[in-house]
Image (cartoon, coloured by chain):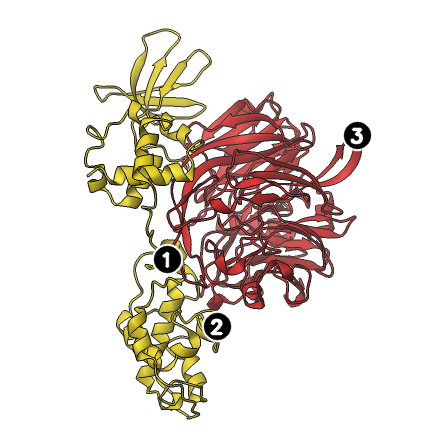
Chain colours: A red, B yellow
Amino acid sequence: MKILASLALAATLCAQTPFDPSTILKPPTDTWPTYSGDYTGRRYSPLKQINSSNVKALSLAWLYRVNSPGQVVKSSPVEINGILYLSSPDNVWAVDARSGREIWHHTHQSHGGIHIGNRGVAITGNWLYFETPDCELVSLNVKDGKERWHKSICDLDMMYYASVAPVIVKNHVLVGVSGDDTDVPGYYESRDPETGDLQWHWSVVPKKGEPGFETWPNEDAAAHGGGMTWGPTSYDPDLNLIYFGTGNPQPVVAGKGREGDNLYTASIVALNADTGKMAWYFQPSPHDTHDWDNVEAPVLIDGSIDGKPRKLLAMACRNGWFFVLDRATGQNIVSKEYVKTNWASGTDKRGQPVPNKAKEPQIDGSLVSPNQGGAANWPPPTYDPETGLFYINATRAFSVWYLYDLDDKPEGWGGTDRGGWAEYMLQAIDYKTGAIKWSHKWEGGGARAGILSTAGNLLFTGDGSGNFIAMDAKTGAPLWHANIASQVSNAPITYELDGSQYVVVGAGDTLFGFVVH
Amino acid sequence: MTNTLWNRPVVCSLIAATVAAVVCLSAQEPPPRPAPKKGGGMLAQAGSADKHIVDDAAAERGRKTYIAECITCHGASARGAQNGPDLVRSTLLLHDRYGSTIGPFLKKGHQTQSTPSANFTDAQLLDLSHFLHARLDDTLRTSPMFHVQNVLTGDAKAGEAYFNGAGGCKACHSPDGDLKGFGTKYDAVDVQQRFLFPGGGFGRGARSTTQIKVTVTPASGAAVTGVLDKIDDFNVSLRDSGGEYHSWVRTGSLKVQITDPLDAHHKLLDVITDKNMHDVTAYLENLK
């Protein structure tokens, strides 16, 4: 049996061909080659073998338990050449996409850092890239999981950590960083795929004399202004622009020492993919004091506004607002709440919300919606071009925000929120207007679950009861479910191999593969 | 300026004259590492696995050195002042472990208030390192310094009026009944939290700990009423008054009627102002 198993493994490995990242521009249906499936971030598949007519026959094909204590699959697996690559902090697994059988497992020897999650891996050629909590970018051989090199991309002593799914764009490995414990500046980098060396570095907070510096009171505040880059990146090859969001400013809750809008924290930014030069920005949460990282997925939509074709970018932000921008210029087209909030007094001439100062954290408390977790967080949304709807698992939550650090120069966090009440729903949003087309309430609570849409008129996601659910994309009606014991903990993916469409989802420490037999 | 970290009169009385000095000190052996503080969960993982762990007694000794030698320039919280930079945010401190970077830096000579820094003993340098790391820890979200302060800023009379009027509280509650002694049972911030969010169970996907009533009526058969156990799009379950468990698959013909006794509290969140909130907190806190 061992010989047969070895031969089978050898056959699998021999079948591997180096992966060309240009495939991501228009991925074939037998692969899910990057975190979001393609560069648009829309998490939509043209596959329709599984559809709203036959989804009731969806059944479990395999499951794979990562078999590492305490690990939760929050990553979106990448699937290339019939092999799934999934990750959790310090771990990467290669798993047969047809059978769920483990091919290899790589463990990184950690030197510390926050192990809250790992969003996924990137692959180009024969090489895989992932970030680690102790600030390393690690390159592995996809064939056997052996390390090629590791490069430090942040300073662990300064309490950065790394959790982002890198993205390959041409000859760039794009990486972001995490951490908002100390007042350190956020940044985003491009690294050489062969060596891991720095190609370009973009600082979230501007230096004196640079545009945006005027939104900080002084150099010290800007230099310690935060804005971590721990969300996904989208890419438009025609414009050669990459898009991502930036995190909250520092100090997180006590904003006394950083009066101003605090650019380019809590923003959506567009950078030239080859130089890192910023093309435009849009700031959903000026002078954020509620930990509302604006790192949700930027979704690229080739749509139409007022009957004219437009290159658009849509984001459902943690602060409860949905925005649609012209992705060539950053011009605002839609600004609308997708759940009711109470922290903004309106929008300015750029379409950015204007924070109500009274709703900043107070010594005696301010009642704010959403709460710290936000109306949305890292679990990604989806956009279905057939329905024209943008779907997001949303939370409508209240909490009381307290200011703790009353020093003239607060640092670090300086306060937090307490308590709360929340309700959970999946919102289907008309991207042209921001109007809620339909809303499906999760009566038993919500899950931190992403969403997949397919040409089969289906949405796949999870609820708070541990159900993995298929819904009618047009109406929101639940069509199928399987209780998989733990809440869905990542965003589902799909691919077709040997004529069978697989839908793969993570829940807790287990990855599940479903097919229609 | 309100400062929670220092007893300012004591600090002021201890500030001495500033003295500059340049002296070399001998290298020191790494000290024994105190046991890590418990608590903080995943957030306590921030930083390196071998990061500096503060020894509280050493930090207290370091406080004395800091007051005597450093406070004039670097300020009461070590966050900088007119004549000296912020030490809490300094990369020197963030890379330090038990004086590993602070020690050599001071050995090179650094302006102090009385004793030349080169004359600091190894023990003083270690204590000073603990003191400065403690100030860094004060800024973290896991800090024991972080606690709610005064929430009793409201007008109790106005709170009473809201309770009996627009808030609609008196429909279910009474200061002489269920709320008698409410302000004695809980401290002020808990009073505030409990009237806003009485259900608890705040986690994602969590249900209120308050018993939600549900009546399930099958297409054929009698209705069953009880306390909701679990509900989602596909199943519903309850326990009846006898403690018996019932569950159903949710179909179009199955009628499910839920009564959440806390609905009025949830609806209040959309209309209550922060002033109302503070006023009601003051009123309820007075119910001794």
Q: Do the dots labelled 3 and 1 sit on one chain?
A: no
- Element type at mark 1: loop
Q: Nearer the viewer, residue B53 or A130?
A: B53
- Identify the chain of the residue marked 1, using the numbered disc in the image: B
Please, what is the three-letter code of the amino acid marked with disc 1?
Thr
Where in the figure is residue B165, as x and y percent of width and height? 35, 26
Residue hosting label 3:
A307
Quarter of the picture holding the N terminus of chain B: bottom left
Residue hosting label 2:
B90
Q: Is residue B82 left or right of residue A326?
A: left
- Element type at mark 3: loop
Mark 2–mark 1 distance (CA, rounded to whole Å): 20 Å
Residue at 37 percent of width and 38 percent of height: B277
Residue count near mark 2 (Cα–Cα under 10 Å), binned few <14, some 14–19, many ≥20:
some
Mark 3–mark 2 distance (CA, rounded to whole Å): 55 Å
Residue hosting label 1:
B142
Q: Nearer the viewer, residue B40 or A71?
A: B40
Judged from this view, the residue extending furthest toward the bottom is: B23
Where in the figure is residue A309, as x and y percent of width and height? 79, 35
